Image (cartoon, coloured by chain):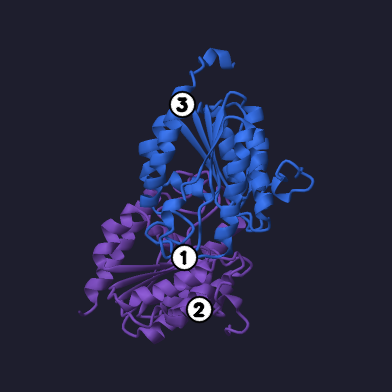
Chain colours: A purple, B blue
Amino acid sequence: MSADSNPAASPSPCQDIQGDGRWMTLHNRFVSDSKGKEPDVLFVGDSLVQLLHEFEVWRKLFSPLHALNFGVSGDATQHVLWRLINGELDYISPKVVVVWVGTNNHGNTPEQICGGIMAIVSVIHQKLPHAHTLVLGLLPRGKSPNPLRERNASVNALVQAEVASLSHVSFLDVDPGFIHSDGSILHQDMYDYLHLTQQAYQKVCQPLYERIKSLLDKQAP
Amino acid sequence: MIARMSTEENPAAEPAPVIDVQGDGRWMSQHNRFVQECKDAEPDVLFVGDSMVQLMQQYEVWREVFSPLHALNFGIGGDTTCNVLWRLQNGELENIRPRVVVLWVGTNNHEHTADQVAGGILAIAKLVLSRLPKSKMIVLGLLPRGEFPNPLREKNAAVNNLLRASLPQLGPVQFIDVGGSFVHSDGAISSRDMFDFLHLTASAYRTISMTLHELLLQMLEEMPQERRALLV
């Protein structure tokens, strides 16, 4: 699937339709912030990444790893792709890049979303040939079973298969079991059935932290 | 100016649910949960609005400052005045008698003018006061947004000016503007206060919660608590 035929893999900035230019402001900040820093870990993605930064778990687990957070709420794969191509990777050399994006790719098929994620993986590898990319699985969403859960699960299966043969990429399913036996997701885990509560972030972040640590330890200083 | 605008003229005062275009029905799930909470709980304070309200509950400050006041949180990210109006007309004010209702909505009304947004907020306030005649209200002003001065800041400030002038006429409604401290002398907003130049960080929520908490305590103290038996 070429970038031309896959909108999810075609880099695009977010248009400022609201009128306060926040998306571009955030992108510009990320680029300028990165000029002064030497992160070992970079997190990039959508609101699940961005909001992580606002909770205690970031300070406890990821700040000590010298991590930067380039999450932007609402971003789909094509937006993250654009940001990474346009400066956000130009001034830093993290050892691990954590990619968590895809749940906002509404209207795209699982194949297209996987293509978008793989395009991101490819750009990271081009710009940071020594970095390891850790792709996180898309979480289930919605209070009850629905097509988006199926879509996200399909994306995960496709991505997992694609990265299996790549040594510089791995896939991590961070769902600790949010779906209960009756098919429901609790608001104690996802207060709006999409975004994580503090308690849910704790459950997701512990195994994520372990994986990042082991990847950092493997990399030669 | 506001009094002239009737519901027929003001799209921001037209109740409307959020249509599920994404496919997971989250908005309706949240609304249904709030309706159920009305059946189960007896809040003294009800917070209703958009993500500014919803996100507050995710930080420690909610547990420390507002839970002890027996507060419920009916915020939904993305909501406009139309959506909040619909929710309050469709169950989210049933079975409860909060002594104070805190309303914070309007920043997402992108299709509407400042006049229309203010009119929408007034319509919500009128609805609440008519359904809960013994309650008081606090209406929070819209915060400035965007890293630098931009048209949305002007619009939100215009909404606030209209509200400041018209809300007191409705009755026991207090308007508070907690946005002043966020804009620095150079016109910039810091990401330490608004991590995406719209939503507040934990520390910014702490700052505004002090003011809000004080006002709530004052209002709650002024109102004799009705014995539950009388509410049946």
Dot 3 crowding, Cα within 10 Å, few <14, some 14–19, many 20+: some
* Residue marked by disc 2: A82
Q: Residue at x 33, y 62 (%)?
A: A208
Dot 1 crowding, Cα within 10 Å, few <14, some 14–19, many 20+: many
Q: Do the residues labelled 2 and 3 touch (CB within 8 Å)?
A: no
The label on residue B220 is 3
The label on residue B147 is 1
Separation of marks 2 and 3 at Cα, in angstroms: 51 Å
Q: Do labels 1 and 2 share a chain?
A: no
Q: Residue at x 68, y 45 (%)?
A: B119
- Return the residue nearer the eye: B179 or A129: B179
- Return the residue nearer the eye: B171 or A86: B171
Position in image of residue A221 (x %, y %): 20, 79
Q: Do labels 3 and 1 share a chain?
A: yes
Separation of marks 1 and 2 at Cα, in angstroms: 21 Å
Q: A66 left or right of A184?
A: left
Q: Quadrant location of the N terminus of chain B? A: top right
Chain designation of label 2: A
Q: What residue type is labelled 1?
A: Glu
Figure check: B115 above or below A5? above
Q: What element carries label 1?
A: loop
Q: What element carries label 2?
A: helix
Does the rendering let one see residue A56? Answer: yes
Q: B50 left or right of A169?
A: right
Position in image of residue B74 (x %, y %): 54, 40
Q: Which residue is drawn at 61% across and 70% down?
A: A109
Q: Which amino acid does label 3 sit on?
A: Leu
Dot 2 crowding, Cα within 10 Å, few <14, some 14–19, many 20+: many
Residue at far top of view:
B229
